[in-house]
Image (cartoon, rainbow, N blue to C red):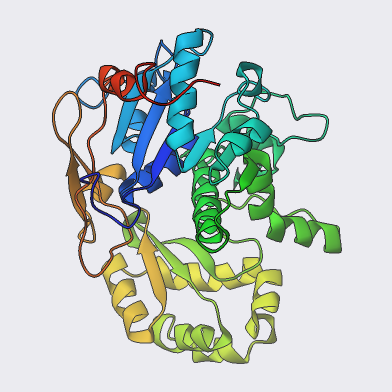
């Protein structure tokens, strides 16, 4: 996206970031038209080296860092530290996800930032927050998935499984974008910035509230059930003829009745007390699934789909990445990168029926010289 267009045009974001959570947050701001200045360590954001699968570049970095300017600063160096201060004196938002206490040791405390720039919105992202025995612990997505209990309910049987995307990082970045937009709205009314503190663990603990309450109030652990659902039935994967799998999701008793009539073609099952309501169906899961399997295995998947559509029952397929690449619902966009344009899935939100052009992915320190001239010691800004 052109930096002069978008709802956040005129908003300047400085982000001292690495990995995924903070970059995802700042990318949402860049997509909305903000000027995002990405400050990298002199060695660069280490996510640049996660892989080299996309024209010799990291898939993670390309996805998370479009539309940003890149400058490498060594905050151990006083002159680089002064450039950082000059940028922050002009900034609207400052995001950082260094290790706990990492930014403060360079003098960038919340109190001093707010004193110098009362309108500045600051967002600190950490693994576990600023309290408790683990506040100084290092954290990565896998570790948070384990600590928050997500791995204990994901997978099948006795094998806990990591969710296949960095869900803790991305959920934290998404939650952070909501918090920053809220802070911007507050500033519009009050003229004052806000300080936001958030953690990957806190984000995921919030998302774990349903299984937590189920355990806390019933004393029972939700079971790992693969593609099935622990408390809703039928809701999961079922094999059709030739082993082709279909996902179905039934949420209401009315849907169950339609399913019995139109799909299973066994209306007598509606009268079976074991299957009358969702809780009873979940409690009688083994008998329920036996009734479904005996019908589905005798039908081609396309025939089951026809019946499901007639009954207005939600369904889906278990697609491979090859299937995903060719999915008819896809919308793509092209993003410029240091090694040429890359096609990727477009953002989900469309404003006024139009998808905006997205900004380019920067090479390491691509804008360093320009930014040093803009915020260097020969400008009118003074260092702290």
Location of residue 384 with respect to 268 vertically, above or below: above
Q: Nearer the viewer, residue 205 or 182?
A: 182
**Residue under the point 32% across and 80% down:** 309
Q: Nearer the viewer, residue 154 or 156?
A: 154
Viewed as shown, does residue 314 lie left or right of 340? right
Q: Quadrant of the C terminus?
A: top right
Viewed as shown, does residue 115 lie left or right of 372? right
**Residue under the point 37% across and 69% down:** 298
Location of residue 371 with respect to 128 vertically, above or below: above
Residue 20 appears in view? no
Residue 373 picture location, percent across and down: 29, 19
Location of residue 233 with respect to 99 vertically, above or below: below
Residue 216 picture location, percent across and down: 84, 58
Residue 11 picture location, percent across and down: 38, 47
Residue 299 picture location, percent across and down: 33, 70
**Residue under the point 60% across and 17% down:** 106
Residue 43 appears in view? yes
Viewed as shown, does residue 367 lie left or right of 101? left
Q: Quadrant of residue 328?
A: bottom left
């Amino acid at each position: 996206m052109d930096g002069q267009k978008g709802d956040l045009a005129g908003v300047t974001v400085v982000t001292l970031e690495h990995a995924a959570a903070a970059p995802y947050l700042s990318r949402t701001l860049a997509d909305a038209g903000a000027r995002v200045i990405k400050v990298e360590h002199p060695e660069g954001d280490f996510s640049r080296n996660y892989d080299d699968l996309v024209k010799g570049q990291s898939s993670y970095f390309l996805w998370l860092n479009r539309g940003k300017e890149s400058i490498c600063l060594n905050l151990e160096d006083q002159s680089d530290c002064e450039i950082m201060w000059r940028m922050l004196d002009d900034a609207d938002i400052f995001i950082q996800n260094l290790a706990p206490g990492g930014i403060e040791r360079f003098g960038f405390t919340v109190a001093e930032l707010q004193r110098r720039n009362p309108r500045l919105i600051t967002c600190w992202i950490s693994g576990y927050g600023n309290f408790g025995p683990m506040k100084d612990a290092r954290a990565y997505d896998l570790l948070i998935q384990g600590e928050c209990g997500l791995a204990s309910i994901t997978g099948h049987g006795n094998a806990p499984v990591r969710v296949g995307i960095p869900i803790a990082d991305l959920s934290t970045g998404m939650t952070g974008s909501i918090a920053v937009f809220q802070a911007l709205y507050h500033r519009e009314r009050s003229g004052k910035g806000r300080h936001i503190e958030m953690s990957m663990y806190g984000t995921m603990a919030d998302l774990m509230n349903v299984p937590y309450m189920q355990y806390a109030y019933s004393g029972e652990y939700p079971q790992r059930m693969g593609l099935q659902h622990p408390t809703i039935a039928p809701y999961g994967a079922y094999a059709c003829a030739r082993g082709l799998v279909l996902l179905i999701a039934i949420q209401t008793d009315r849907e169950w009745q339609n399913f019995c009539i139109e799909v299973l073609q066994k209306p007598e099952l509606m009268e079976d007390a074991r299957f009358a309501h969702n809780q009873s169906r979940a409690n009688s899961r083994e008998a329920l699934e036996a009734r479904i399997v005996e019908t589905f295995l005798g039908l081609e998947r396309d025939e089951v789909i026809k019946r499901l559509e007639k009954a207005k029952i939600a369904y889906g397929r278990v697609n491979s990445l090859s299937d995903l690449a060719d999915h008819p619902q896809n919308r793509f966009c092209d993003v410029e990168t240091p090694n040429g344009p890359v096609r990727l899935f477009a953002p989900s939100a469309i404003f006024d029926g139009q998808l905006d052009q997205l900004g380019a992915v920067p090479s390491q320190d691509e804008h360093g010289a320009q930014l040093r001239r803009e915020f260097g010691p020969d400008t009118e800004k003074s260092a702290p």
